[in-house]
Amino acid sequence: MLRRLAVALATYLLLFAVGPAAGTALGSPGSAPAITSAQCDAQVNDTPSKLLPCIQQKDLWDHMKAFQAIADANLGPDGHPSRNSGEPGYKASVDYVANLMSAAGYDVTIQTYHFFYFAFVGTPTFREVSPTVHNYTIVAEWNAGQATGTTTADIQPAGGFVLPPTPLSSSTSGCTAADFTGFVAGRIALIQRGGCNYGVKVQNAFAANASGVIIFNEGNPGRTGVIAGTLVDAAGNRIVPTIPVAFTSFDTGIHLLTEYQQAVQGGTALPVVNLDTQAIVDPNREDYNVIADSKGGNKNHVVVVDAHLDAIYGAGMLDNASGSTTILDIALKMKNVTPLNKLRFIWFGGEELGLFGSQYYVATLSKTDLSHIGYDLDADVTATPNYTIGVLDPAGPDLFGGASTQTFPNRVYKASGVARDQAIQYFDSIGKNHELFSPVGTDAINFNFAGIPASGLLTGQDCCKTQGEVELFGGFVGNFEGNVPSFDGGCVDNPFRWCDNLSNNDPAVLTLMSKAFATMVVQMAFDTKVMSASDNAVYKPKLPIASEASRRFTTK
């Protein structure tokens, strides 16, 4: 463990951690701030003791309400509020941030890149017409593949089924053209999971003139429920079929198969299914990163402060209007600061689709410009109601996978501990626990891959909060979101739920995490060793921040 700030720093952090994070229970009203937002805007918030009281819940929540209003005013193709990349709500979010940062005196650039855009129009449907009449519920009973088309037709099984299922996966249904020998053109192909990529099964069905595809789970232990598949070919390349594709459970597949077999044996009509999936497909959709540089600071010593601005499947208020709000409020409260290191605030697009914005940004930097970035700080989900307090560390375990799955250049590990320990010291000072997570799944990972140290904060999403985390942070086992224990995956990153709205966020948690993130930003803004991959921060003795640091800190 790297050296921590000593008791003196902990004491001042405790004194200046105003609001819900400073001794009142999360979710309960905090005391009125000792300084007004207007006063904060007028002063130079160049130390934690000045900056932290200025990170106020009302200001944060006003930005959150603005992002929700943007989503509400810009419906996506599915007819619901949206701030998804490639859609008007995302561009409106870009403009909102860019205008505020420009007005605050930052040098703002909107960086453009392009990506493969797919969006469902309306809600896809899957309905058995006969002999059973049943409307399958999206997500709960089936998931739509990223394809487009409509059909009402008889079903017909492909070859290659393994029934009953073996203990381990052994089906190769639909994986070869031979599995469609005797297939009647125009029918819907019923295919068992297993043996090859989903896209290969669909390509073979399409070549056999199927009008649609239903892929059901294989039935082995752990492979029985409703599936959500990605359509890629044998080489892993994305395909967008022009026939509808449905993914469903083993039980649903067996139900349809049984009806088909009974119809064949009895000489009656085959089961009829309707599939309808409409979509917009644009292989070259424009998207944006918002980049805002501080007026002051050494341009050869850059600290990037980032959050992703895009959503997926809707308003995206927790993921990630919350993190975008955190860095926006900090940037606006530091507008009068002349940092030692240039601060570069970046709101990335396309994170939900594959870290596209940060990947493009890092990949297109010249070798010289890349060498001038000394650090990255990432805020990705900062207002989770049933929260954890996660601190990013390149050596930490993955958020969803347990053990760390990535390695990075050696220089990132020790140096990433500097900001990591600043956050830990802050949480220690206010009596809050923490846990470490790797940057996997966050934009910080692209900086780590490039050899740039990084840390950041997150509060958890989706499923599932463990009993150990409940013991650390309170709350309940299950979803990080919502008001009751549940294991259904939550609102975030799940299609056709449209529930990651303002109510999916806790303003007290947002305030707590924004204050913690602010301690990291303001300290890294003045660290003279930010370019050195050092494992400790160094401040010039004449800087205001130096008087608040521990005597253990080297100052020269």
Image (tube, rainbow, N blue to C red):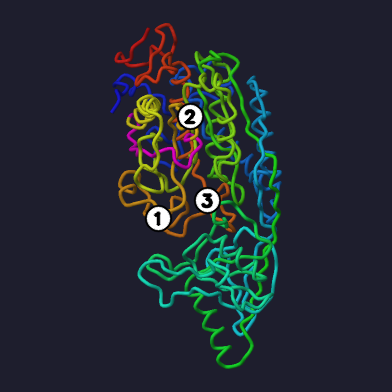
According to the picture, the residue beneath numbered tag 3 turns out to be: 492
- The magenta stretch is 429-445
Q: Residue at x 40, y 66 (%)?
A: 169
Nearer to us of marks 1 and 2 is 2
Q: How many other residues sit within 10 Å of disc 1, few (<14), some (14-19) or many (≥20)?
A: many
- Point out which mark residue 450 bears: 2
The secondary structure making up most of the magenta span is loop
Q: Amino acid at mark 1?
A: Gly
Q: Position of residue 330 (x, y in %)?
A: 53, 27
According to the picture, the residue beneath numbered tag 1 turns out to be: 478
Q: Residue 410: which quarter of the image?
A: top left
Q: Quadrant of the C terminus?
A: top left
Q: Is residue 7 left or right of residue 85?
A: left
Q: Position of residue 457 (x, y in %)?
A: 44, 35
Q: Amino acid at mark 2?
A: Ala
The local secondary structure at tag 3 comes to loop
**In-front residue for pair 478/166:** 166
Q: Is residue 436 magenta?
A: yes
